[in-house]
Image: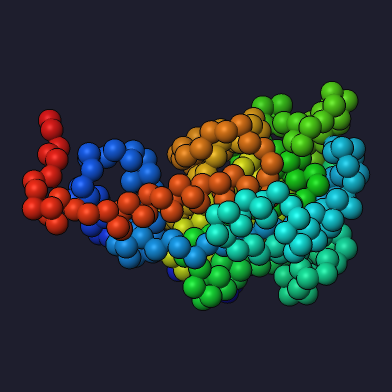
């Protein structure tokens, strides 16, 4: 599916189904609104799917894996080789999120969209846009055409999962240096100074942080990305993983599958998707509050509030997966709890 085709398919979520779900919650034999925002979450899933039963049992995690040329500037603790190593670990269930996903009954789908070397069991030629981006401090990270192709990889991954029967998609990423590209993207899109959106990522020293901030500033200065042109921003100072996840959000919206936002990198991708198509917002579910400084700014721009606050910053989709058991529990109450009608009892009233 092409980008323009996906954008043409995205419509607002079904408000009639949402209202039917709200009315159904009123009949469940428990105090009104006592599950709080979890009731709103189940209602949103119903509206996204167009099914009042809020299907969300078959779950997938898409992990976009890519290297970033800006690592050459000394903005990370480790080298690009770690990206390939961890990507391979996803296939061995040897990464943190693998254990979490197993507990959440969620299937993993790592995508080599731009790892520097091929990864056995992951690399698919049609999904690999390039072997890592160029160093954005010295010029555009990629061409506009490569950025569009990366977005379309994500769109088609979401569509494939829909065809395979998946009802809920979480987003994750793996790419050394991707908090640097994320800071650059969000600095441009939010029109914020780099100092306000650049964090320590996986843990940088003071000197490393100085190099990272300088790299973000220099990349924006050299490339002059247009904040009103998402593909210009992604191609000049973005990453293949961000572009791919942007596509997952758009693809999920196009095929009516809810997509869960993970941390700051996923949030940047969600903001890109929203700016490309405002109607995509209704298909996005925020998961947790990332410790990265730009995360809350991105959430404010989207008008979303995360469901979990655990101080996490692991990445890989771990926060998105952590939300899944809560979704399962809330959906279970919604679908399986007896109603006041089945008890032949009058339910709670909404009081003034």
For residue 56, above or below residue 326: below
Residue at 52% x, 44% y is: 287
Q: Is residue 143 visible?
A: no
For residue 279, above or below residue 251: above
Residue 239 locus on image (x, y percent): 74, 52
Residue 54 locus on image (x, y percent): 36, 60
Residue at 23% x, 43% y is: 30
**Quarter the C terminus occupies:** top left
Left or right? Give the position of 114 relative to 279: right
For residue 138, above or below residue 215: below
Q: Is residue 330 visible?
A: yes
Residue 320 locus on image (x, y percent): 56, 48
Left or right? Give the position of 328 relative to 196: left
Answer with the quarter of the image where residue 267 lies.
top right
Residue at 22% x, 54% y is: 338
Residue 259 locus on image (x, y percent): 51, 56
Left or right? Give the position of 99 relative to 259: right
């Amino acid at each position: 599916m092409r980008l323009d085709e996906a954008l043409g398919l995205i419509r607002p979520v079904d408000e009639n189904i949402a209202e039917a779900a709200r009315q159904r919650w009123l009949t469940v034999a428990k105090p009104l609104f006592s599950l709080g925002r979890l009731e709103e979450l189940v209602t949103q899933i119903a509206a996204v799917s167009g099914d009042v039963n809020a299907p969300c049992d078959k779950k997938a995690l898409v992990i976009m894996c890519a290297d970033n040329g800006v690592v050459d500037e000394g903005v990370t603790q480790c080298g690009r080789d770690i990206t390939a190593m961890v990507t391979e670990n996803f296939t061995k269930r040897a990464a943190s999120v693998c254990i979490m996903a197993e507990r959440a009954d969620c299937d993993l789908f790592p995508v080599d969209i731009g790892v520097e070397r091929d990864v056995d069991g992951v690399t698919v030629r049609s999904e690999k846009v390039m072997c890592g981006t160029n160093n954005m401090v010295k010029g555009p990270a990629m061409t506009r055409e490569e950025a569009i192709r990366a977005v379309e990889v994500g769109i088609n991954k979401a569509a494939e999962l829909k065809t395979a029967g998946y009802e809920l998609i979480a987003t994750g990423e793996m790419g050394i240096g991707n908090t640097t590209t994320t800071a650059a993207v969000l600095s441009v899109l939010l029109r914020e100074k780099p100092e306000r959106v650049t964090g320590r990522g996986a843990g940088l020293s003071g000197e490393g942080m100085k190099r990272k901030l300088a790299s973000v500033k220099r990349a924006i200065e050299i490339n002059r990305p247009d904040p009103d042109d998402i593909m210009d921003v992604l191609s000049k100072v973005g990453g293949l993983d961000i572009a791919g996840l942007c596509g997952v959000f758009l693809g999920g919206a196009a095929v009516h599958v809810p997509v869960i936002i993970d941390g700051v990198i996923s949030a940047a991708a969600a903001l890109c998707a929203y700016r490309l198509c405002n109607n995509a917002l209704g298909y996005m579910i925020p998961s947790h509050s990332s410790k990265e400084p730009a995360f809350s700014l991105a959430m404010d721009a989207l008008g979303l509030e995360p469901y979990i606050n655990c101080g996490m910053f692991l990445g890989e989709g771990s926060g998105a997966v952590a939300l899944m058991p809560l979704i399962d529990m809330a959906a279970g109450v919604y679908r399986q709890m007896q109603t006041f009608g089945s008890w032949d009892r009058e339910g709670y009233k909404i009081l003034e």
